[in-house]
Image (cartoon, grey):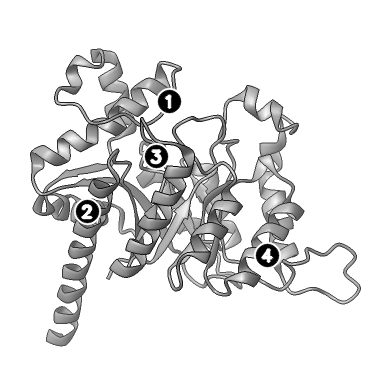
Amino acid sequence: MVPFSVLDLVAVAEGATPGDALRDSLDLARHAERLGFNRFWVAEHHNMPGIASAATAVVIGHLAAGTSTIRVGAGGVMLPNHSPLVIAEQFGTLESLHPGRIDLGLGRAPGADMRTFAAMRRDPNASEEFPRDVQELQALLAPVRPNQVLQAVPGGGTEVPLWILGSSLFGAQLAGLLGLPYAFASHFAPAALLQALETYRSTFRPSAQLDQPHAMVAVNVFAADTDAEGTRLFTTLQQAFTNLRRGRPGKYQPPIDDIDKFWSPMEKAQAEQMLALSVVGSRETVDAGLREVVAATQADELMVVSAIHDHAARVHSYEIVAEIADAWQRETLLCDQTN
């Protein structure tokens, strides 16, 4: 049985506010918990009017306080933007408040344009220190050693599970060498997916956190009652990626009936390349598409991203995915009983 998890963009829809997006995210997390999803992650993005999760640790605290069993975490924190000590303190605090429910996914990209990165007062070369910073963070979250001079309080001894996130071979190799779980950002950068998974698995070394590789694959899912409705809902994300490439990031737009009137042939080709790992349509279509993803990647976990404009439609999409997950689980149980 492949576990299903949720990556929520905390998207700010046209006509809504960041407060609306944060309240909808908590409502979605509660639905995800009820529906049996494994974890619920949010990501760090800055200077983007359509995403309300910049203060990622604060958002995670909001979500964890409003749920009770689902794992909640960062997918991820962009470590070059922060000192490892501050992140250890933030996530040590979250783990102390919500024991056994916090995940910390780490990315090497700044999660912002260079002007915004400069506004954070960070060294432009900070990403070069990513491997060292990950290991420093590990040490700060590990049990406190006798006479340890620098401690994260809270943080030391919480051993918050770390993940390496990536869309290239660099993160895959680092995750393998450190023996950490790996999540690939194939929902917007799928080109190196299969090669990265092979690199991760071939370089994996068991660690105190993990004894065998665990690879999670992110996939856009726009599930609806019909293929036509799923295709229409998908135009929100297609518009968002096109506007981003045009240098005009903004709030998430309502779906439209004819996306080809919105973009140029070149923009269409660019968006289709970035959104190639997207499963769109009815339950039957989405079921078949997700099976193809698992067969091709041998993913240990799927992270579903559904950036749908209307909140009710977004919840319904996850309900359909949960039905698919339940059917897969029944198939697995039946297969085990038969064998």
Q: CA distance from mark 1 to mark 2?
A: 24 Å
Q: Are marks 3 and 2 in contact (CB under 8 Å)?
A: no
Residue drawn at (71%, 32%) of the image: 125
Q: Residues within 10 Å of mark 4 (few under 14, many from 20)?
A: some
**Considering depth in this image, is 84 or 295 the residue closer to the camera?**
84
The circle drawn on residue 192 is 3
Question: Does residue 148 appear left or right of residue 101 in this picture?
Answer: right
The earlier-in-sequence mark between 3 and 1 is 3
Task: Provide the residue designation for mark 2.
Answer: 316
Task: Provide the residue designation for mark 1.
Answer: 250
Q: CA distance from mark 1 to mark 4?
A: 33 Å
The quadrant where residue 79 appears: top right
Residue drawn at (39%, 39%) of the image: 192
Query: Where does residue 112 sit, x and y in percent of width and height?
Result: 57, 31
Amino acid type at mark 2: His
The earlier-in-sequence mark between 1 and 4 is 4
Question: Does residue 13 appear left or right of residue 230 in this picture?
Answer: right
